[in-house]
Amino acid sequence: MSGKQMEGDNQRRRTLARQARQRGRRPSEVGATFGADKQLTSLDRGRRDGPAPAGSRKPNAERGGPVTPPPAPAERPNPVPDELVGTTTTDVPVIGYRELVSDIGRRAGVDFEQARAAAGATVVTLARALDAADRQRLLAAVPNQLHDDGSLAAGNRRRDLAGFLDEVARLTHRSPEQARYQAQATLSALAAQDGGLIDSLNLPPELRDLLGPPPAGGGLVDPAGATAALTDDELRDALATLPYWSGDRRRLTRTIELPPENLDRVLGRLSRLRPETGRGPMVGRESPGTAVLTVRTRSLDAVTAPDVALAHQIDDAIDEVGAGMAAPPPERASGPRFGP
């Protein structure tokens, strides 16, 4: 090393030493001592390479040295709530399952399980009866618990009213009369939950008879699905088809007046109705040539739809005997006759 270079290095060391003292540090801490030229070289390398790695004698976190803070964790998005996982948004509002079934139960007067069965059977049978676009609209709006691909494919497409009710009755294990009542309750509840849904469907004309609310107890079945007493209007309509009968809401009666031998033949035929159909009339023999036939439902003390059907069966049985009547059927000038 030349003398000029040594002098320059010494001046540099003096400057560094003076700066170190001004900062309250010792010259040796900044490599500015006069012990060796390699200190400057080491200082320059340290500035270029950064601090030396910790050795066996160097202080570190385990031997009292400074602790390097851990890197900050990467920011994570907020978790998605469980109830939103797997759901998709749609423009079609979905009717609530329990709310719908409970409403059907209130309208039909049945428990939750019966209401669920009625709702499922009505929805599935209606979906089969609709065209593809209307079927998709219906199934998108009703709860998934009321239908599945298997049930939709398993039955027949019935677009007539009688066939529709037969299919609902088959699925619910109810009579067609009970099926009608519960189907009306289901459609009424659907209309109440989503007013535009039922109106938007192109229903077969015969099925539109089901859109009215179910009768409150009159007709074929009562709200609990049992046989119900006829209303005044229903009784009047029934008597219009039974010209030999009269009655009120408690009973229907027909009086037969025949020669005794002919009357015996008629009553003998009527006695076979009960074994054949499970029901038969009450017979009052007022005289050898006169008998009064009465039909009613004792448990309700009223006339029901099965009583009307029995009256028709009695008329058919009398016609079958061929005994004939002593007089033509009475004329009804102003509607059916009520009372005895």
Image (cartoon, helix red, strand yellow):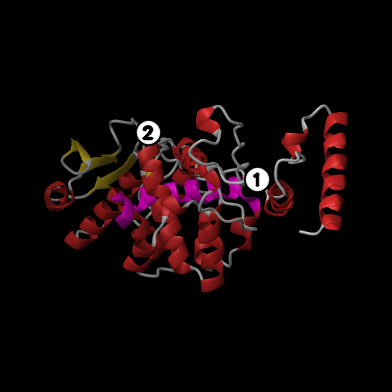
Q: Which residue is mark 1?
A: 51
Between 41 and 294, the residue placed more toward the observer is 41
Q: Which quadrant of the rendered structure holds the N terminus?
A: bottom right
Q: How many marks?
A: 2
Q: Is residue 151 above or below residue 334?
A: below
Residue 10 horizontal/vertical position (percent): 83, 46
> Which region of the structure is painted magenta?
170-195
User: Which amino acid, mark 1?
Assistant: Pro
Please tell me whether residue 8 belongs to the stretch shown in magenta: no
Q: Is residue 211 above or below residue 286?
A: below
User: Which amino acid, mark 2?
Assistant: Arg
Q: Is residue 286 left or right of residue 331?
A: left
Q: Is residue 259 left or right of residue 250?
A: left
Residue 310 horizontal/vertical position (percent): 27, 49
Q: Is residue 106 above or below residue 238?
A: above
> Residue at horizontal 74%, vertical 49%?
40
